[in-house]
Amino acid sequence: MTPSGAAAPLVEIGKSDDVGAWDRGEIEPRIKTILDRTVRQRATGPYRPKSDAEVIAMLGRFFAHKGYREVAVTQVSRMSGGASKEQFAFTFRHAGDTEGERLVLRMDPLEAIAQTCRGREAEVQRLMADHLPIAPVRFHDADGDLLGQPAVILGFVAGVTEPTALRGKGVSGMGGQLGEFAAKLAPQYIHALATTHRFDVANTTFDYFSVPRANSRQAAIWQVNWWSRVWWDSLVEPVPMVTLAERWLRENAPVCDTPVLVHSDLRMGNFMFEEPSGDFTAVLDWELAHIGDLHEDLAWTTQKIFGAWRDDGVFLVSGLLPRDEFFRLYEEASGNRIDPVRLHYYEVLNAYKCAVMDLGQAMRAAKEGNNHQEVVLTWLGSAGAVFLDHIVTLIGDR
């Protein structure tokens, strides 16, 4: 079945065995901790980007505390890209490994476009390492107790996010072109989504994640409360359409029968591959991962801003394949059936999340000077209008 236009009715919320649509306290505990910390630390800025020398000193203390001797941190280089984490590549040597290993440090500035948890990122990547190509997690410091700010240290993975020959013809992740590699990448992309959604949530004990109740609206309300909290905590100026979208999302929150692992940002730009084979080398950016509704991932990747167009004008999901074909192949690979009503709901939710990030959190972080890329964050604010227009169209369709 190809998801299409069935109307989304208002649903009854607030039954005794379900969650209340307007219960703002209904939020995943670890997310509440992260958002509370953001507000608490905001006034300690502005944030100053780290120098190579500071990174070397931080890592030296960290590895010494971990019991390594004769530590050497060399070849430090700031990594470009990213509006969320400050990232450095470096080589780590110690008494037991004189050859060394190339690693990547991802650490939190005071504020970013998305406030997330390095403990969650490390945990989900370790859990998925046996299922998908993923950068190996070497260390993490969830609350910055040793490094001074929350961080995760990953193994370095080679690859590209767009073909070298087409580089510069679009922004990677937003309008990039995959050319002849699309046919090689599409099956691997479908496999990555299906594999993520098949992960055995029910029989896994999590340290940093909570699992919403099955056959309830908790999965949806947790997400609405997460991003509503971000909006009202970071508000620079009111935007009526954002408020309207929040109300619509609360009034139309659907039941999730079986919560699954949701990547939450699996799209063009967040998978790496090698040339010329086109083989995936890593599925990237698990920082927004949570347990929720599979339709959230599907709705996220079908957003126009994360895709591209063929020469004949057909939209390609994540620059890979047409929307109807994407849904058909996903259903075949996953065994899941796509509910058009839930898909539509999560299209609205994802547009809302993006508007909150661009017009709320990004603007607040830039205004306070609490990020190492204020110019990038300010530029992203211009994308907010795209998502507001998308919300109008989606809600207007119903």
Image (cartoon, rainbow, N blue to C red):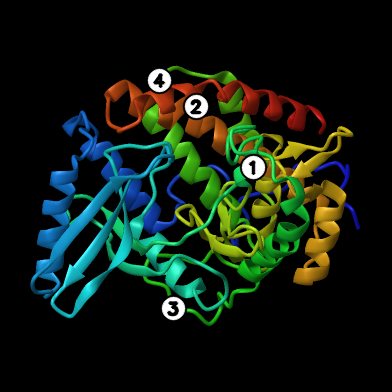
Q: Secondary structure at mark 3?
A: loop
Q: Is residue 389 left or right of residue 156?
A: right
The type of residue carrying mark 2 is Leu
| For discs 2 and 1, the disc positioned in front in the rendered view | 1
Q: Secondary structure at mark 1?
A: helix
Q: Is residue 146 visible?
A: no
Mark 3–mark 2 Cα distance, whole angstroms, equals: 37 Å
Q: Earlier in the sequence, mark 2 or mark 4?
A: 4
Number of marks drawn:
4
Q: Are marks 4 and 3 in contact (CB under 8 Å)?
A: no
Q: Are marks 3 and 1 in contact (CB under 8 Å)?
A: no
Q: Position of residue 197 (x, y in %)?
A: 64, 67
Which residue carries the number 1 mark? Answer: 165
Name the residue located 18 percent from the left edge and 49 percent from the top edge. 55
The type of residue carrying mark 4 is Val
Mark 3 neighbour class, 10 Å CA radius: few under 14, some 14 to 19, many 20 or more: few
Q: Earlier in the sequence, mark 4 or mark 1?
A: 1
Name the residue located 79 percent from the left edge and 72 percent from the top edge. 335
Which residue carries the number 2 mark? Answer: 380
